[in-house]
Image: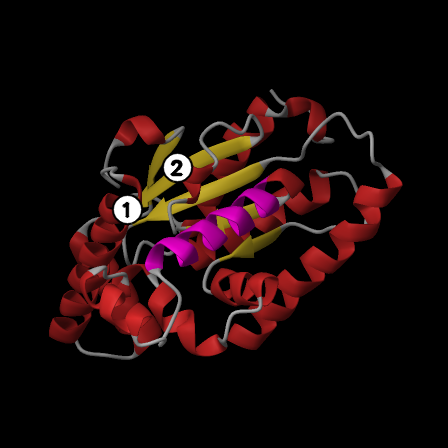
Amino acid sequence: MATGSYEKCKQYIETHSPLSETFPHRTHHYPCITISRETGSGVKLVCEELIKILEPVSEQNDVRWTFFDRGLIEKVLEDHNLPKQVSKYMEEEKYKYISGDVDVLLGIHPSQWTLLHKMTESILQLARMGKVIIVGRGANIITAKLKNAFHVRLVAPMHNRVKHIMEIENIGEKEAEAFVKQKDKGRREYIKSSFSKNIEDLDMYHMVVNTGLMSYKESAEIIAAAVMERFSDLFRVELK
């Protein structure tokens, strides 16, 4: 699955290059959707459903809607020729400054600020291309000033999220709950340390969707409807 996601991300980048040369004076930008999420809220399933809805009503060309989650890390490494060993330092829940200074002195990996800068560059590049869903890593903050960006926060009750993690990770309830809490804590710290923001600040999002009260398909339909309404001139659909 990870390989498949990476190949789709790579194809997205490759197909954008000739299009940018073909349409150098394009006056519009396709939407970029950023999704911040609570662990276990089903972001991957929501993204898959969202693409199924948006792809048929978007302009048909070689560029297809794509979502970047963990594959984004590999995209950054590819963009900036960084050794793959540093990928573990770029994950949200493992983002630490204290040990980072020592590791830089020892030549183990680039500084965290360097990695953050390169990550920011890649996210902005993807967002400007459009037809992309970017999950996590402060993408909503990085793209806050882009007019083609739409920001979503996925949430769900703890018991729903624990159940989802139990299913996809094949682990017990206590382990799943600890997993959820650890991941959530890491993401809060990442946003706080990197951007001095509170990930739960609702002012940063166009909408908040509770996947505990709706199915993943229904959640995707609500997001898609809002995106198509906001960027109605870019979709081939008649809105009621």
The stretch drawn in magenta includes residue 120: yes
Residue 30 percent coordinates (x, y) = 66, 35
Looking at the picture, which amino acid does disc 1 mark? Answer: Ile
Which of 143/237 is in front? 143
Residue positioned most to the left? 174
Q: Image quadrant for the C terminus?
A: top right
Looking at the picture, which amino acid does disc 2 mark? Answer: Ile
Picture residue at 41% right of the left edge, 72% below the top: 86
Q: Mark 2: few, some, or many residues within 10 Å (few <14, many ≥20)?
A: some
Residue 47 percent coordinates (x, y) = 50, 52
Residue 141 numbered mark, or none: 2
| Protein image colouring | secondary structure
For the record, the magenta segment spans 112-127
Picture residue at 35% right of the left edge, 64% below the top: 91
**Secondary structure predominantly adopted by residues drawn in magenta:** helix
Q: Is residue 26 left or right of residue 41?
A: right
Q: Quadrant of residue 70?
A: bottom left
Q: Which residue is mark 1?
A: 191
Q: Given contact means CB atoms under 8 Å apart, are the residues at marks 2 and 1 in contact?
A: yes
Task: Label 2, secondary structure: give it.
Answer: helix
Residue positioned most to the right? 22
Residue 206 percent coordinates (x, y) = 40, 28
Residue 111 in view (yes/no): yes
Q: Is residue 14 left or right of residue 129?
A: right
Residue positioned most to the top? 240
